[in-house]
């Protein structure tokens, strides 16, 4: 997976992602689009506590199994989202979606709409982070599990991009 910086100064980590049918998204300023919405992964600025990272990893596995959803075919996408959730849990006290831009993260976390699992995921199984993918999604992998080692390895050296 290739990360490229777009003009909005967010890091688009999904450029160059290959889906199950072999289609590769261009590594350019374009972002992965799902139902005409852009997906941009942004992360908090601090490294998460290992215990929090493990908590969010376990939550993600359990929620995927309970809802009949799957992780992305490229597990590094799953790892980055889990790490972002853990960073926000440490920083804000809630697993605020790391894939959106917020003018006021603390206020958004308090309101709860975008706390994972977000309202669109709970109501319609729509996860724009690509953490929980439905069976018909071409980026869906076969797994509902990821190890802590996989999360750590896939996110090694990544630092937060937004304050």
Image (tube, rainbow, N blue to C red):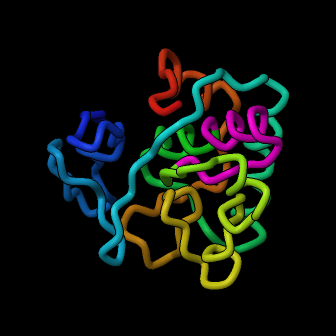
Query: Is residue 93 magenta-colored?
Result: yes
Q: Residue at x 49, y 59 (%)?
A: 130
Q: Residue at x 61, y 39 (%)?
A: 84
Left or right: 83 as drawn, with respect to 5: right
Left or right: 13 as drawn, with respect to 81: left
The answer to whether 118 is drawn above or below residue 13 in the figure is below
Majority secondary structure of magenta residues: helix
Residue farthest to the bottom?
Answer: 124
Span highlighted in magenta in the image = 83-98
The answer to whether 21 is drawn above or below residue 68 in the figure is above
Q: x and y percent of residue 162 in the render? A: 48, 33
Q: x and y percent of residue 19 in the render? A: 31, 57
- Count up the numbered dots: 0
Q: x and y percent of residue 57 in the render? A: 73, 42
Query: Is residue 130 magenta-colored?
Result: no
Left or right: 124 as drawn, with respect to 122: left
Q: Quadrant of residue 23?
A: bottom left
Q: Residue at x 83, y 42 (%)?
A: 93
Q: Nearer the viewer, residue 108 or 137?
A: 108
Q: Nearer the viewer, residue 108 or 86?
A: 108
Q: Residue at x 59, y 54 (%)?
A: 143
Q: x and y percent of residue 101 in the render? A: 48, 51
Q: Nearer the viewer, residue 52 or 151?
A: 52
Q: Quadrant of the N terminus?
A: top left
């Amino acid at each position: 997976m290739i990360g490229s910086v777009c003009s909005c100064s967010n890091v688009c980590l999904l450029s160059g992602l290959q889906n199950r049918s072999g289609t590769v998204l261009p590594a350019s300023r374009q972002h992965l689009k799902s139902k005409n919405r852009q997906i941009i992964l942004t992360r908090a600025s601090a490294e998460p506590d290992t215990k929090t990272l493990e908590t969010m990893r376990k939550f993600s596995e359990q929620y995927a199994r309970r809802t009949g959803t799957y992780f992305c075919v490229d597990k590094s996408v799953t790892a980055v989202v889990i790490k972002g959730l853990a960073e926000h849990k440490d920083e804000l006290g809630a697993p605020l979606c790391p894939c959106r831009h917020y003018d006021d993260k603390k206020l958004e976390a308090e309101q709860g709409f975008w706390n994972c699992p977000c309202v669109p995921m709970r109501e319609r199984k729509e996860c724009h982070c690509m953490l929980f993918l439905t069976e018909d999604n071409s980026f869906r992998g076969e797994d509902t599990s990821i190890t802590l080692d996989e999360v750590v390895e896939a996110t090694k050296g990544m630092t937060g991009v937004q304050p």
